[in-house]
Image (tube, rainbow, N blue to C red):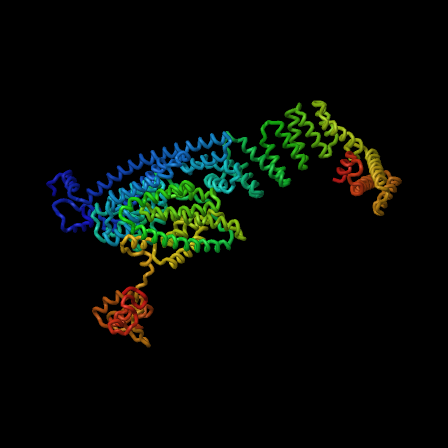
């Protein structure tokens, strides 16, 4: 065999060995098949993409025209062509949520969530689905995931909108602590938008987070000194926190900026009234405190007597005993003692409570007195 | 053209002057290794073919039915009829060997044609089925894919001049590749072929089938992406009481699947008796009826996977799911019995899924305990109907497991599928593919029957000794050995001692030719002493 050159041997092999011939033939066919299928599948994918896009665009147009049902149909068709396209899936899910088809929407959203668990929009939509189903805990969970999830830079304001939705849900559920926490988060990330900040501040006030409200309004008043709501809110916040002097100062500032605001005028009047009778006001001497406490008890007794007379003058024996005790206390000689001061205040608070129980809404409310005595009770 | 593969030329017969032994001897590949390597090629080719088939069906569907429906409403009515007419003509006049069930044709290749599947079958199935399914006839692409895979395998086997015994195994290898690529589920492809087509679990067979199925799926995914057959929502078992519901689905699935087989058998038998010209008209008529139903329920047209996916995402209410199941059942029954080319796998999954979903929806509403979403029941329903119709319970379990990728679903699926399988078998003993073969006048073995066949053993025939005796030297048998194997020894010795497997030196009985005859029911008949019938042995085994 050595007399045959190598290429002749190879030629001979190719000619004679049928299996080798077959292998080469199959390999060639395989390469051709791969090439053909590659072109075919590429054209197929392009066709699918263009058909999917066409339906998606039709869906978007239908949505703009307000035809939600048509939009859903088109989005569904778009998804048939490109089931993996998250934009199509999300658009369909949003349309389904809006149309109230919650089961189908949730199914699509859960599938999208599997691929993108931190996506803010998907979590927000799931939160809305849960909220519509009154599954509050689940909804709060999804809202929180939405808020802390990923949002594209172009859609960052949607994160705040999602947090506002969460706040609204927490408000409905009266979940005060979580609500205050979310409001403070909103405030921490709030843009320089006075209206939104004052809204946060007033909601904090509404839910008794006075010190947080003071912080919000104080910053707002500092950054926007001409903004009336900032001073009004700060005034209210100071008032609620018991700093009546500061409250009066801020309300005066608010009135200065907008004299027509009746709410501020009323608040100023109340602040003045409270300052006039509050025995716990700072920088008062002991004698002043004693005198104010004495006057406070007298005022309570007077209010109570007026109410009793209006009700026919009949009193339950225990209440009569407490009134008698109060009169004895007022006439007492031990006027210099510290204990006496507290006795006067305690008795005033007790009788004020009795008056509220006995008279209910019949008597004319003495707001200043109520504020002072409630504050003393705290 | 030869219908039989040529036996390989023995190496010794070749001319030694030329260096011809490069393949396989110089590379050092044995026949088994060559077979495994070929399985890889078969898988790749089958995968490519299934990709083209899938694309062809979609393209025809877009063109004829039009995804931008509405203005194509009229087309929806006529498209399946025209498609079925064209597909029927192709199968009857141009590619007659592509007619019939892919599973049965593959079985015929194994048991009757030494693995030979005509190459024209591949083209015929491809064209006819893509037209029929693409135009909206209610049939699926998996069975044709299976047969196309078998055809590719057979062609390659012939090209490489495999030995006859190996050629017999090559068709199922291609079948597994075809069905695995069509379902995008390699395990299901392998199991179905092992369970339904071949019933052979030898290492070489399993190895080559697995290799082909995996390479087919990988090839398919390379071109069409890793998209699963169904997009399954998260599933969880909500309450233990739900297992009762799943068992109930099994009962419903078993009952309806048996009825479905009976209906197909009855309708096919009836239609076979019609005049010959009707074979051209029947597919068109079936297509027209499908189009008619499709005017109200367009979801039932074609394979129906889009509708199943939509249902899995909660698009339909449970009464709609029920109507869809009924509509699909009717149109599939008509299309399949009319002889329209296409497979039954997809419609079966559709019907089972919709029935399960409807059941789950109703349960969700009225079941007093917490119940999973109807989508979970859809999955289980698919499995039950598959198990009930095709009588392949293991495949049905793994099919659901593979498409759902959920381990939690295994328990409900096992309960439901086995219930459906047993009930369907009880109600209609003959398996689906065997019934089809019988209607078509072919006698093919059923893998289910092969599995259930219990061969007689030595212990069934031996004469048991009252007291144990020490063993003598020479031939011996164990009680669990097949009786057929004992016959070989009895040809040499008239009496063989049967020894215990635990103590091989202890004789527990003896076996003679008379004992064997008696066990097979031969001796009694010769003696005229009664006992077993001439046809059956002592345990109902055909004599």
Give the residue at the far front of this rendering. B275
Q: Using the rendered view, name the quadrant where residue A351 is placed.
A: top right
Q: Using the rendered view, name the quadrant where residue A208 is placed.
A: top right
Judge from the rendering whether residue A309 lies leftward or rightward of residue A84; answer left or right. right
**In front here: B474 or A337?**
B474
Residue at the image position 46 percent from the left and 46 percent from the top: B375
Count of marks overlaid on the render: 0
Residue A20 in view here: yes
Residue at the image position 61 percent from the left and 35 percent from the top: A183
**In front here: B392 or B95?**
B95
The percent coordinates of residue A193 (x first, y second) are 60, 27
The percent coordinates of residue B82 (x first, y second) are 32, 39
**In front here: B284 or B308?**
B284
Judge from the rendering whether residue A356 lies leftward or rightward of residue B65; answer left or right. right
The percent coordinates of residue B446 (x first, y second) are 31, 56
- Image position of B365 with respect to A266: above or below: below
Residue at the image position 21 percent from the left and 45 percent from the top: B159
The percent coordinates of residue B289 (x first, y second) are 37, 44
- Image position of A313 with respect to B389: above or below: above
Residue B222 in view here: no
Give the residue at the far bottom of this rendering. B467
Give the residue at the far left of this rendering. A3
Judge from the rendering whether residue A91 lies leftward or rightward of residue A287; answer left or right. left
Q: Using the rendered view, name the quadrant where residue B451 is placed.
A: bottom left
Quadrant location, the C terminus of chain B:
bottom left
Residue at the image position 34 percent from the left and 60 percent from the top: B452
């Amino acid at each position: 065999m050595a007399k045959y050159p190598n290429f002749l041997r190879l030629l001979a092999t190719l000619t004679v060995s049928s299996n080798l011939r077959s292998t080469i033939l199959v390999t060639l066919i395989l390469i051709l098949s791969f090439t053909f299928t590659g072109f075919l599948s590429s054209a197929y994918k392009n066709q699918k993409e263009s058909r999917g896009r066409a339906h998606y665009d039709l869906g978007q147009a239908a949505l703009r025209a307000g035809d939600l049902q048509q939009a859903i149909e088109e989005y569904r068709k778009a998804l048939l062509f490109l089931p993996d396209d998250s934009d199509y899936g999300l658009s369909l899910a949003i349309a389904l949520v809006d149309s109230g088809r919650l089961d189908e929407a949730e199914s699509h959203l859960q599938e999208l969530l599997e691929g993108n668990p931190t996506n803010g929009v998907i979590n927000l939509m799931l939160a809305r689905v849960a909220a519509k189903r009154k599954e509050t805990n689940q909804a709060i969970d999804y809202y929180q995931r939405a808020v802390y999830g990923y949002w594209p830079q172009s859609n960052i304001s949607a994160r705040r909108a999602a947090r506002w939705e969460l706040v609204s849900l927490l408000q409905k559920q009266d979940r005060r602590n979580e609500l205050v926490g979310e409001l403070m988060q909103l405030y921490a990330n709030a843009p320089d938008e006075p209206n939104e900040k004052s809204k946060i501040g007033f909601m904090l006030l509404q839910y008794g987070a006075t010190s947080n409200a003071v912080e919000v309004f104080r910053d707002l008043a500092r950054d926007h000194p001409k903004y009336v709501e900032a001073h009004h809110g700060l005034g209210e916040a100071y008032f609620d926190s018991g700093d009546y002097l500061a409250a009066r100062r801020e309300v005066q500032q608010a009135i200065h900026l907008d004299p027509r605001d009746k709410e501020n005028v009323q608040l100023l009047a109340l602040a003045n009234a409270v300052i006039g009778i509050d025995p716990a006001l700072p920088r008062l001497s002991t004698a002043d405190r004693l005198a104010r406490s004495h006057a406070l008890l007298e005022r309570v007794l007077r209010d109570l007597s007026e109410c009793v007379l209006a009700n026919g003058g009949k009193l339950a024996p225990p209440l009569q005993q407490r009134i008698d005790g109060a009169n004895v206390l007022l006439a007492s000689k031990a006027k210099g003692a510290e204990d006496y001061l507290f006795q006067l205040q305690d008795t005033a608070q007790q009788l004020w409570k009795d008056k509220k129980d006995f008279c209910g809404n019949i008597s004319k409310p003495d707001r200043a007195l109520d504020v002072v005595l409630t504050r003393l009770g705290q | 053209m030869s219908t039989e593969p040529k036996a390989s030329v023995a190496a010794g017969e070749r001319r030694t002057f030329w260096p011809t032994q490069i393949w396989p001897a110089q590379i050092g590949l044995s026949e088994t290794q060559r077979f495994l390597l070929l399985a890889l090629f078969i898988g790749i080719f089958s995968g490519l073919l299934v990709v083209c088939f899938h694309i062809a069906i979609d393209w025809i569907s877009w063109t004829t039915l039009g995804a931008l429906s509405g203005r194509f409403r009229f087309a929806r009515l006529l498209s399946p009829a025209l498609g079925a007419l064209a597909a029927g003509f192709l199968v009857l006049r141009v590619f007659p060997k592509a007619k019939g069930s892919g599973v049965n044709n593959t079985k015929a290749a194994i048991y009757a044609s030494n693995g030979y599947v005509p190459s024209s079958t591949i083209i015929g199935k491809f064209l006819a089925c893509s037209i029929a399914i693409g135009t909206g006839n209610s049939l699926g692409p998996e069975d044709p894919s299976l047969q196309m895979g078998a055809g590719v395998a057979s062609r390659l086997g012939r090209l490489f001049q495999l030995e006859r015994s190996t050629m017999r195994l090559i068709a199922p290898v291609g079948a597994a590749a075809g069905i695995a690529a069509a379902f995008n589920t390699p395990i299901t492809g392998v199991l179905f072929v092992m369970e339904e087509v071949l019933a052979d679990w030898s290492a070489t067979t399993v190895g080559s089938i697995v290799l082909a199925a995996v390479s087919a799926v990988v090839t398919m995914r390379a071109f069409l992406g890793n998209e699963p057959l169904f997009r399954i929502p998260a599933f969880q078992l909500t309450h233990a009481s739900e297992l009762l519901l799943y068992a109930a689905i099994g009962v419903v699935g078993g009952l309806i699947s048996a009825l479905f087989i009976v209906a197909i058998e009855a309708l096919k038998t009836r239609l076979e008796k019609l005049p010959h010209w009707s074979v051209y008209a029947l597919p068109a008529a079936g297509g027209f009826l499908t189009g008619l139903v499709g005017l109200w329920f367009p979801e039932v047209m074609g394979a129906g996977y889009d509708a199943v996916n939509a249902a899995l995402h909660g698009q339909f209410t449970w009464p709609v799911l029920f109507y869809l199941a009924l509509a699909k059942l009717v149109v599939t029954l008509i299309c399949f019995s009319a002889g329209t080319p296409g497979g039954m796998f997809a419609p079966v999954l559709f019907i089972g899924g919709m029935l399960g979903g409807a059941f789950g929806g109703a349960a969700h509403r009225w079941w007093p305990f917490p119940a999973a979403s109807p989508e979970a029941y859809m999955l289980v329903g698919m499995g039950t109907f598959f198990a009930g119709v095709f009588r392949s319970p293991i495949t049905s379990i793994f099919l659901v497991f593979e498409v759902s990728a959920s381990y939690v679903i295994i328990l409900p699926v096992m309960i439901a599928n086995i219930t459906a399988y047993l009930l369907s078998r009880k109600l209609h003993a003959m398996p689906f593919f065997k019934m089809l073969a019988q209607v078509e006048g072919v006698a093919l073995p059923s893998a289910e029957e092969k599995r259930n066949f219990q061969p007689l053993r030595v212990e069934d025939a031996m004469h048991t000794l009252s007291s144990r005796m020490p063993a003598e030297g020479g031939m011996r048998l164990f009680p669990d050995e097949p009786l057929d194997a004992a016959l070989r020894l009895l040809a040499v010795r008239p009496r063989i001692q049967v020894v215990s497997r635990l103590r091989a030196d202890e004789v527990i009985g003896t076996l003679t030719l008379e004992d064997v005859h008696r066990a097979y029911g031969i001796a009694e008949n010769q003696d005229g002493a009664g006992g077993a019938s001439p046809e059956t042995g002592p345990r109902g085994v055909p004599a």
